[in-house]
Image: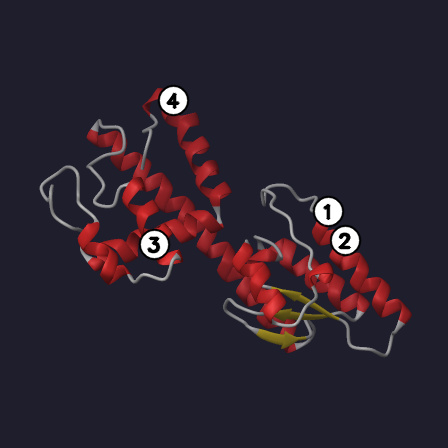
Amino acid sequence: MQSQLDALEKHGIPRDKIFSEKISTRIRVRPKFEAALTLARQIKAHAPHCRVILTVYEMKRLGRDAAELTALADHLTAYGIVLEMLAGPLPGIYDPSGPGRMLFAFFAAMAETERESIREATLEGLDAAARKGKHGGRPAVITDDMLYTVLRRRAAGETVEAIRPDLIIPTGKRKGKSPSVASIYRALATHEKIAAYPEVVEQARAEYAAVAGDGLPAIV
């Protein structure tokens, strides 16, 4: 969150013009986001010939499914508001109408596909762990503590290569050894996906629990 705020400020947006909120994406009512849209509409109404730009850090800050993003595109088009994204698959400024709207819908579909991929991977992991008859299946090469260490030290400016020798696998065939760089990057990629779509993992676990009952593993 702070890195996104820093990026917006660095882009030249005054702090008092930045709207931020931490809220589950399952909740459709987003007060701060609605306030930002309201301000954009008011500015456009008072200066209809001026270019009003709604700037977000990346697309997933706007919505998490194609229907929500398409509705937003309709809203921005109706009020003549231009969208700008600083990061993600489509950085830059564009009007979500015509070809721009088609591209907007394309990336919305990509986001929805990623969510479904995470859901399926979570269900497969839960099923595999249950089949092994263990809580969480085989011991993870990268434990939660190790991942926390990597995240903390990377945030301080260290590279994965520099951190790796200090990570020791606690159990399993490779006990006492350091994980490979590839294993660390895979763990980071998985963490980023889960962090971006936590409600998808929660939904998948709830779906599995409804079918498997008490057989739900504690950790995947």
Indicate which label's residue lies in the foreground, 2 or 4. 2
| Disc 1 residue type (three-letter) | Pro
Q: N-terminal of the two: label 2 or label 3?
A: 2
* Element on which disc 2 rests: helix
Q: Position of residue 80 (x, y in %)?
A: 79, 71
* Element on which disc 4 rests: helix
Indicate which label's residue lies in the foreground, 2 or 3. 3
| Disc 3 residue type (three-letter) | Arg
Rendered residue at 53%/68% (across/down): 87
Q: Position of residue 169 (x, y in %)?
A: 17, 43
Farthest residue, direction front:
156
> Badge 4: how crowded within 10 Å, few (<14), some, or many (20+)?
few
Residue closer to the observer: 208 or 1: 1
Q: In which image quadrant can residue 154 be found?
A: bottom left
* The label number, if any, that marks residue 213 in the structure image: 4
| Disc 4 residue type (three-letter) | Gly
> Badge 2: how crowded within 10 Å, few (<14), some, or many (20+)?
few
* The label number, if any, that marks residue 31 in the structure image: 1
